[in-house]
Amino acid sequence: MAADHQKRFHWFLLLPALLFLGVFLVFPFILLLILSFRDVDAMMNTLETYSFSQYIEVFTSDVYLKTIGTTLWTALKTTVLCLLMAYPAAYLLVHAPNRKWRALFYILLVSPLLTSVVIRTFSWIVLLSQNGLVNETLISMNMIEKPLPLLWNMNAVIIAYVQVMLPFAVLPIATSLSDISPNVKHASMSLGAGRLRTFFCIMLPLSLPGMITGAVIVFSLAAGSYITPLLVGGRMQPLLPLSIYQQVLQVFNLPLAAAMSFTLLAAVCLIVGLLGMILKRWEARMNG
């Protein structure tokens, strides 16, 4: 009897959060899904009829297919770069000499998250523009004769993505590394394995869950972000979030924008699901 009361109490504690998610997430999600099946007339007015025309347009248009591929490829490159840069930083965080250094490293890592992503993105415009700090420095050092086109391209988007997403990759990897007992490393080296072999055969496999978690977070954020590419890449970049933005605010084709949104959501969920399957198989293998 007491157990039943305890379960009911747990559900009662969850009720406010469930109501909030239901009203402000699930219900708008359902409305957006319904909207994605609505038809439009020549003036982009939403009609009362339903069909698959919006999804057919998304998956039969070469422009939109290229946009989907570019979006996923850009998110994948951002994820790989973030993981390559995040692992050494996470290793330094975990193996800091003392608590003061560790606290300082965490402050340096988390402090960019306290600043608006818009402000951080505008800082890249200051750095990469034709009269920005990078070009002015290179010209003053006589390394180039005229400013380089560092802004308004996909490379600028990826650079800004990595800077914005990097903390989200470092923290899961640091958590995974901190869960590894130092005795495991010492045992490996006492059995004759060198530092490199210990890292690649012991530390790296055990930290894989943190890497996959960081990859899921970074990939999801990079695939769905539109503020950063809009500011540093321009609205003409072939990215799906920018296409959704244009359909909503410029073309006013809301059903097509909704169909694009669910296409992006399905693609991201598919990639995240594959990473989750890899993580489960790896954990099953590690646990025997």
Image: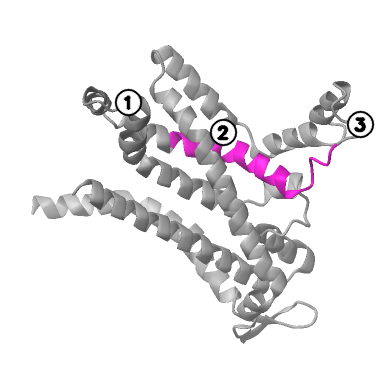
In the image, what residue type sits under mark 2? Answer: Leu
Q: Main secondary structure of the magenta part?
A: helix
Image coords of residue 281 (percent x, y): 29, 55
Mark 1 or mark 2, which is nearer the start of the sequence? Answer: 2
Crowdedness near tag 3: few (<14), some (14–19) or many (≥20) residues, C-alpha within 10 Å: few
Left or right placement of residue 155 versus residue 103 in this view = right
The residue beneath circle 2 is 113
Using the image as rendered, state which of residue 99 and residue 252 is in the foreground: 99
Gap between marks 1 and 3 measured at Cα: 49 Å
For the point 48% across and 29% down, which residue is it?
A: 88
Crowdedness near tag 2: few (<14), some (14–19) or many (≥20) residues, C-alpha within 10 Å: some
For the point 58% across and 52% down, which residue is it?
A: 75
Using the image as rendered, state which of residue 29 and residue 98 is in the foreground: 98
In the image, what residue type sits under mark 3? Answer: Glu
For the point 60% across and 74% down, which residue is it?
A: 35
- Mark whose residue sits in front, 2 or 1: 1
In the image, what residue type sits under mark 1? Answer: Gly
**For residue 194, which numbered disc appears in the image?**
1
Image coords of residue 46 (percent x, y): 69, 78
- Whether 105 is drawn above or below 237: the answer is above
The residue beneath circle 3 is 145
Q: Secondary structure at mark 1?
A: loop
- Whether 100 is drawn above or below 133: the answer is above
Image coords of residue 122 (percent x, y): 74, 37
Mark 3 or mark 1, which is nearer the start of the sequence? Answer: 3
The answer to whether the residue labelled 1 contacts the one labelled 3, judged by CB atoms less than 8 Å apart, is no
- Work out which residue is located at the far left of the displayed protein and give it: 1
Mark 2 or mark 3, which is nearer the start of the sequence? Answer: 2
Magenta range is 148-171
Q: Quadrant of the N terminus?
A: bottom left
